[in-house]
Amino acid sequence: MRRAFFILSLLTLCSLPVAADDRLEHGDWSSQFLDGMGEATTHENGMAMFGMLCAKGSCRYYFANDMDCEAGANYPLMITTDVGALSFDAICEPMASANGDVMLYWFNESPALNQALAKTPSVGFAFPLSGGQFKTSKFSMDGYNQALERMVNGMRAKKEAEDHPADPGRT
């Protein structure tokens, strides 16, 4: 039952109402804009989600894997790519969805991570559990670069329009 709720929440989060031409598919990734935010995201068979959300001039990656977490607590993540493995501390924070809050693990972007993700065909996440066990997730990176480029360029254009609104008196 909990897994079904998680899957439904993830699907709802990614299908929040947006303009019909606003959400674009880029291979296994998608990009969209909603309420001043831009998002690039992918899924692992409805069981996990990985993406980037940009708002108010900053961007953060997120990961969700159906694991409960305590809001505000830090959790270790290991990310593997073709160029090597990277470890991160992620912070658990809720994200509002149509079905209530979904708990996501957020972590900051870095040049090393961005470069590794841009050059790999897939990325793996290892999430430590008790007793020396790990929960793993693997995501295709097909379309990642295009989804991120569209989302980042869209956010820049929005900021530019906000910073320099058109003069209504000019023609």
Image: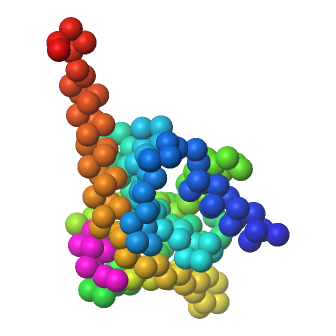
- Looking at the image, residue 164 lies above or below residue 142: above
Left or right of 139? Residue 145 is left
Left or right of 52? Residue 152 is left
- Looking at the image, residue 31 lies above or below residue 131: above
In this view, the residue in front, 3 or 128, is 3
Q: Main secondary structure of the magenta part?
A: helix
Q: Quadrant of residue 51?
A: bottom left
Number of marks in the rendered image? 0
Residue sitting at the far left: 170
- Looking at the image, residue 95 lies above or below residue 46: above
Q: Position of residue 74 (x, y in %)?
A: 51, 64
Identity of the residue drawn at 59% across and 53% down: 15
Left or right of 124? Residue 134 is right
Q: Quadrant of residue 88?
A: bottom left
Q: Position of residue 160 (x, y in %)?
A: 23, 34
Q: Position of residue 99 (x, y in %)?
A: 71, 50
Looking at the image, can residue 62 be seen?
yes
User: Quarter holding the C terminus?
Assistant: top left
Q: Position of residue 126 (x, y in %)?
A: 50, 82
Residue sitting at the far bottom: 132
Q: How is the image coloured?
A: rainbow
- Whether residue 83 appears in magenta in the rendering, the answer is no
In this view, the residue in front, 4 or 101, is 4
Residue sitting at the far top: 169
Identity of the residue drawn at 44% across and 47% down: 22
- Residue range in magenta is 113-121
User: Quarter holding the N terminus?
Assistant: bottom right
In this view, the residue in front, 75 or 117, is 117
Identity of the residue drawn at 30% across and 64% down: 146
Looking at the image, can residue 71 be seen?
no
